[in-house]
């Protein structure tokens, strides 16, 4: 688990060299950022970090672990990203976890929608290495649009893509590396489809953390409320930027507090990162909450007596979201037929013992990728790589160009392994790329229904 100093690293786009310098990283770390920035994509970053991390000094290795998990997240290796960077936030002082006798789990989408009915600003945070924390934003978009919210701001967007809304989909040039992750891309597509005005708001350049939060708030005020006195705004931010008072960012006054001062509107701030799944700690606060309330979907805790929503830090944010666990014993087993032979991806039972779960490239993908059943399984295997490993298999909507953010993506790093893509019914261009970004093969596929579909293997 990581201390507050390391957690602060999670607040920035780590591959932006100017931002890295502003955060006072040491020379070795800045060299690492610059090297990664020159590499052609997440697969190359993943491969480089895997090879160089053992030789790094411990502080640099911790930074590299976060960068590796971010690359794994972009590559669709979602459970591996969680296990590879088991981020545990510092608990609030004198934290008392709620008891099931006094509190109950309720749908986060339903409760947040109810709380948002009379608000002008709703903010929800996400963890950059854990795409599960992005699904709730995707689910909230239609509910908030129906309530009259008309602006959607995303931290990962940049202001150098003026054609984004007209085009209807994000490309690699639309934002930072976090936007390359497919679920984030789906969020932006859905916001545009629903008619939101999409707003980039992050700050570029050599700035301190405080200057960044001030700049974020000023950008949101200028681009939204100064132009539209009746605007209602939904913000997807990283970590503690959604806080309404000092605390988790030390002496920094966060973006949400700055925006509240500028607008006079009290944001509805929703936290998803205080209690994160790590996959390794089975006695921490997250595991205690899961054991007591057993959420099956993104949930908040509601008081059985007065209906109030639980917040571990009410001065900072209005509610904590508890996500169901995705890394389970089942995540480590995946029997699949490959070339007529059974492939069993787990051979060492000791890997399954509690407290000793380790990150493996052959883990099953999490069930939440079905997005409540709206996406179908499409079976793929490493034969698509044509013996050029590692490779990444990505599905792009057929009516979007090659540089559009993929609908889903998965990286194979070993031979004789199998997995799935998760795709909505429709037509896709399936592209297989090697380490340097070169296309190894391409085909068009159609996803038609709820059954698991299989692709022809490459020989």
Image (cartoon, rainbow, N blue to C red):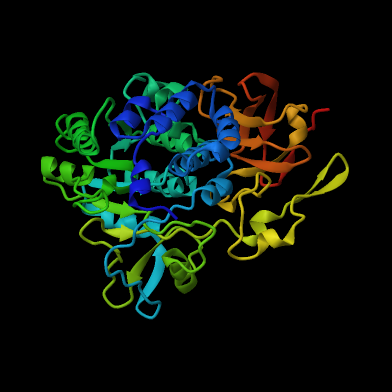
**Residue at screen point 23% across, 62% down:** 314
Percent coordinates x, y for residue 226 in the rendering: 14, 31
**Rendered image quadrant of residue 316:** bottom left
> Does 200 appear above or below 239?
above
**Residue at screen point 47% across, 44% down:** 58
Quadrant assignment for the N terminus = bottom left
Percent coordinates x, y for residue 36 in the rendering: 49, 27
Percent coordinates x, y for residue 254 in the rendering: 22, 45
Side of 459 where 6 appears, left or right: left
Please name whichever residue, 161 or 150, is drawn nearer the observer in this view of the structure. 161
Please name whichever residue, 181 or 211, is drawn nearer the observer in this view of the structure. 211
**Residue at screen point 30% across, 34% down:** 24
**Rendered image quadrant of residue 312:** bottom left
The residue positioned farthest toward the right in the image shown: 340
**Residue at screen point 51% across, 42% down:** 69
Side of 403 where 265 appears, left or right: left
Please name whichever residue, 249 or 4, is drawn nearer the observer in this view of the structure. 4
> Does 119 appear above or below 283?
above
């Amino acid at each position: 688990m990581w201390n507050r100093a390391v957690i602060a690293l999670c607040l920035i786009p780590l591959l932006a060299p100017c931002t890295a310098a502003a955060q006072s990283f040491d020379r070795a770390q800045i060299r690492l950022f610059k090297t990664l920035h020159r590499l052609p994509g997440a697969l190359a970053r993943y491969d480089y970090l895997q090879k160089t991390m053992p030789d790094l000094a411990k502080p640099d290795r911790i930074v590299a672990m976060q960068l590796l998990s971010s690359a794994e997240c972009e590559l669709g290796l979602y459970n591996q990203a969680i296990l590879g960077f088991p981020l545990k936030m510092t608990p609030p002082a004198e934290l008392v976890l709620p008891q099931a006798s006094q509190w109950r789990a309720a749908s986060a989408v339903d409760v947040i929608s109810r709380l948002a009915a009379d608000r002008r600003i709703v903010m929800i945070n996400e963890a950059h290495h854990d795409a599960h924390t992005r699904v709730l934003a995707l689910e909230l978009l239609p509910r908030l649009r129906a309530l009259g919210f008309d602006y959607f701001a995303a931290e990962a967007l940049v202001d150098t893509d003026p054609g984004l809304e007209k085009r209807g989909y994000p490309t690699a040039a639309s934002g930072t590396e976090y936007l390359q992750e497919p679920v984030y891309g789906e969020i932006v597509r859905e916001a545009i489809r629903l008619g939101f005005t999409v707003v980039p708001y992050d700050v570029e350049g050599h700035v301190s953390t405080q200057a960044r939060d001030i700049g974020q708030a000023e950008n949101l005020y200028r681009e939204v409320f100064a132009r539209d006195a009746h605007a209602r705004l939904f913000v997807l931010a990283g970590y503690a930027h959604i806080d309404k008072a000092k605390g988790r960012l030390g002496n920094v006054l966060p973006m949400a507090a700055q925006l509240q001062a500028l607008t006079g509107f009290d944001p509805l701030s929703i936290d998803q990162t205080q209690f994160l799944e790590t996959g390794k700690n089975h006695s921490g606060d997250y595991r205690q909450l899961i054991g007591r309330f057993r959420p099956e979907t993104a949930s908040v805790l509601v008081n059985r007596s007065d209906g109030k929503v639980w917040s571990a830090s009410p001065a900072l944010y209005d509610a904590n979201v508890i996500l169901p666990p995705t890394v389970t014993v089942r995540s480590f087993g995946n029997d699949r037929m490959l070339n007529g032979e059974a492939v069993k991806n787990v051979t060492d039972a000791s890997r399954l013992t509690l407290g000793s779960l380790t990150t493996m490239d052959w883990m099953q993908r999490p069930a939440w990728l079905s997005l409540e059943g709206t996406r179908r399984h499409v079976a793929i295997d490493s034969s698509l790589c044509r013996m050029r490993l590692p490779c990444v298999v990505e599905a792009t909507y057929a009516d979007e160009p090659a540089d559009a953010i993929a609908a889903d993506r998965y990286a194979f790093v070993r031979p004789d392994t199998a997995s799935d893509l998760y795709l909505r019914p429709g037509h896709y261009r399936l592209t297989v790329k090697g380490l340097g970004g070169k296309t190894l093969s391409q085909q068009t596929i159609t996803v038609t229904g709820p059954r698991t579909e299989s692709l022809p293997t490459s020989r």
